[in-house]
Structure formats: structure tokens, C-alpha cells
Amino acid sequence: MADNNKRRIAVFGSTGSIGTQTLEVIEANPELFEVEILTAQTNDKLLIEQALKFHPNAVVIGDESKYDAVKTALLPTNIKVFAGENALEEVADFDTYDMMVAAIVGFAGLKPTLKAVEKGKAIALANKETLVVAGDIVMQLAVEKRVPIIPVDSEHSAIFQCLVGETRNKIEKIILTASGGPFLGKKPNFLVNVKRHHALQHPNWVMGAKITVDSATLMNKGLEMIEAKWLFNLSPDQIQVIIHPQSIIHSMVQFEDGSVKAQMGLPDMKLPIQYAMGFPHRIANKSPRIDFRKLSVLNFEEPDIKTFRNLSLASLALEKGGNLPCILNAANEIAVWAFLNNRIGFLDITAVVEKSMEKISFIEKPNLSDYFESDGEARNFAASLVKM
Ligand code: NDP
Ligand code: MG
């Protein structure tokens, strides 16, 4: 902690959906938090705006061609400016922050997050891909370094909150809720014609493009099953997915006595973000509350895994482990990118992931460099399928 007892926050991916909401939480709680590091990939304008407002010690712009623009704009300040992929790890290695909010999207978040864990920094983890790819290595290192990894993903935050005070009690299973996304109830004959703009309209949440598509294909829930396995040390048969279209119950834990705890709230990512940042304390806010008198129904149904086959592919990856989740993730990142660029159809996303999982060699006990190699191989193979 800084001398003034404020928690010094490094926001990795500050220009994204989670990043900007993290800064809103910090702005609303200046007595609790201050910004130490901000990072963006290409959005130099917003990064500059954020830096001038929050006065961090350092900023990183991933795209090196934007370095001059950021450097020039921040010249009148004493903010340090870095550029390029390696700079993310360099600033993650700083002593001067207390907590990383890991809000980069995709595999790119893995290295800086690992560096922060190695450094012994608390992690508020939004970047689920980090655990999907290398959950064994990340969690093992976190145990060694006694680093708390506090989930920001709403479902995992819900489970984490249900588990507070239950350290001695065994989990029988967790129930991950899924909104079902914009295509709930639709069949392949509809999905075959779905375009980018349809998939980007999520009924309950406003999020970055990649996770919004993942929510529409249900891959997001698949990734979350794997994320949950590592965060809560669960076996595959302890993880159940249920569709709950209202997104009021964010997830549940069932204990050995059959008792079930659920965490509820209106769908608002600032809640899990501020919970992770303030843990173990809750932070008062004025966000809208649930009015149970107006909530007429909460619905639950089984996911349609015949239509949304990504969920089955992710279950397979969860079950087999090794480098299979890493392959699934890499192929999915390429396929989603190709879909967002109108190169492949909605149903092709699943086909690309499935073919990549069949093609790339399985490694049962990968080390970190195996994960990087599998990621690269799966990306190249998936790219060859979408003709990039
Ligand atoms: P966004 O796409 O909105 O933001 C991503 C952030 O990462 C941006 O700051 C972006 O910079 C930066 N970035 C993108 N690519 C790279 C890269 N290759 N290297 C370094 N930085 C990069 O994503 P979200 O905020 O929606 O999601 C972030 C993470 O949080 C994801 O893992 C997602 O699954 C997870 N999550 C998000 C939720 C949400 O509500 N949004 C809910 C639960 C989990 P730039 O803006 O310059 O491109
Ligand atoms: Mg989620």
C-alpha cells in the first residue's frame, strides 16, 4: 500500500469495457484507490485522456506506431510512456503498485498477469483466457507467492462471494448461470445467417466485441467452466451450466448438505469489479437496486448443446485438460476475429475450433513454452481455415 493507504491500481486494458468501468470505480472512490499504470493496445486517444485525468506513474501503448503521439501529448506531465508488447511485462514488474486489474482481452493478457503474480501482486482477474490457457501454472504460482486472485467475471465473483466464510466446507457443485445470449432458443437454420451486428447485441450486458460474440456462441460459458475449475479447484463433474435469461442470479454454490447459496444483483459489471478491488470490504454505492416486488419471474433451462456445440467442445477441453483448452482458446480467438471481419459465418466459428482441436497435437502435461507453442500452432492452423 502507498503511504496514504490508498490501493495503487495497475489497469491493464484500461481503454476496454472492463478497463473504463474500473476507472469509474476509482473515480468514485478517490479515498480508496489511485491509478498507477494504464495500458492500451491501439486506442491512443482514450489512453491519453485517461492519463491526463488520473495521473498514473506510467502508461503503455501496445501499438508502437502510436508511441510518438502518446509521448508528445504527455510531455508536459512526468508520466512515463512505454510502447510494445514487452513493455507490458516491464511495467507489470514495477514495485510501485498493489493490485493489477487484468482487463486485457485474450491470450495477450497471460504474460503480464503471470509477471504480476510472480511479483506477488494481488490480481483482480477479468481476463479469463489467462486461466483457460495456463490455469495450472498461474494458480500454482499464485499459491507459491501467496497472491490472491480475485475474479471479476460476474459468475466467478458470485461463486467467490458465496464461498466467503465457507473455507472448511466442501463444494458439492457450482451452478454457472448463462443468459443464453441474443440467440437463445434459435436453431442452426437461423444461426447460419447471423451477421456481426446481430451477434453484437447482447440482451443484458454491454461488453467488448470478443466476449459479446463468445456470449452469443456460448463459448464464453465454456471458457468460464474452465476458469472456474482453476479458480475453485473443481473437477469437471462439479461444474454445471444453466440458462437463466434474466441475469439476476450471477451463479450458485451447492454444498454437501444440499444447501444452495446464490449471489444476486442487477447486471452491472461495476459490482464485481469494485468487489474484487475492495476485497475483503464491500464499497457503498448508489447503483440501482433489485426491486423484488417488480421481479415477477426468474427462469432456468438446460442449455441447448446440440445447437451451441461450443459448450460441448469446451466440456471436452475441460475433461481432457493438457493443452486442449489452450488450443480451443487460440482457435476461438482467430475464428471470432474472422467472424467480426465478415470472413466466416457464425456457425463456422465452432467448425474452426473443432478442427483445430482435432489437428493440433495433444500434450498431457504442458509447460509454459508448450502453451505458447500450442497457441501459435492453433492460431496458424485456424488462420489457414479462415484464409487470413
Ligand atoms: P475490450 O475489447 O473492451 O477491451 C480490451 C482491452 O485490452 C482494451 O484496453 C484493449 O486496448 C486491450 N487490448 C486488446 N488487445 C490487446 C493486446 N493484444 N495486447 C494488449 N492489450 C490489448 O474487452 P473487455 O473489457 O470486454 O474484456 C476484457 C477481458 O475481461 C476479457 O478477457 C473478457 O473475457 C473479460 N470479461 C469482460 C466482461 C465485460 O463485461 N466486458 C465480463 C467478464 C469478463 P485498445 O482499446 O487500445 O484496443
Ligand atoms: Mg461472465
Image: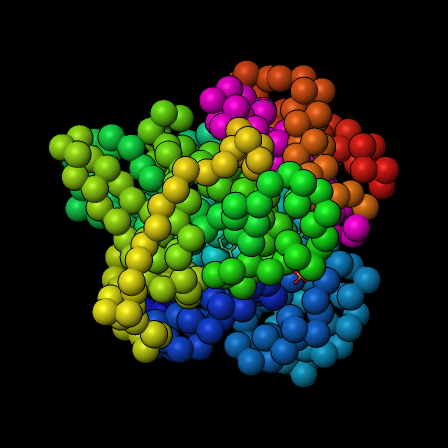
| Quadrant (top left, top right, bottom left, bottom right) of the N terminus | bottom left
Left or right: where does residue 354 sit relative to residue 144? right
Coordinates of residue 288 in the picture (x, y in percent): 34, 74
Relative vertical location of residue 317 with respect to residue 249 in this rendering, above or below: above
Is residue 332 visible in the rendered image? The answer is no
All told, the count of numbered labels is: 0
| Quadrant (top left, top right, bottom left, bottom right) of the C terminus | top right
In percent of the image, x 60 and y 80: which residue is there?
Answer: 52
Relative vertical location of residue 359 with respect to residue 109 in this rendering, above or below: above
- Residue sitting at the far bottom: 76
Coordinates of residue 182 in the picture (x, y in percent): 56, 54
Any magenta on residue 327? yes
In percent of the image, x 65 and y 73: which residue is there?
Answer: 46
Coordinates of residue 70 in the picture (x, y in percent): 72, 72
- Residues rendered magenta in the picture: 313-342
Residue in the foreground of this view, choosing between 72 and 176: 176
Coordinates of residue 313 in the picture (x, y in percent): 56, 28
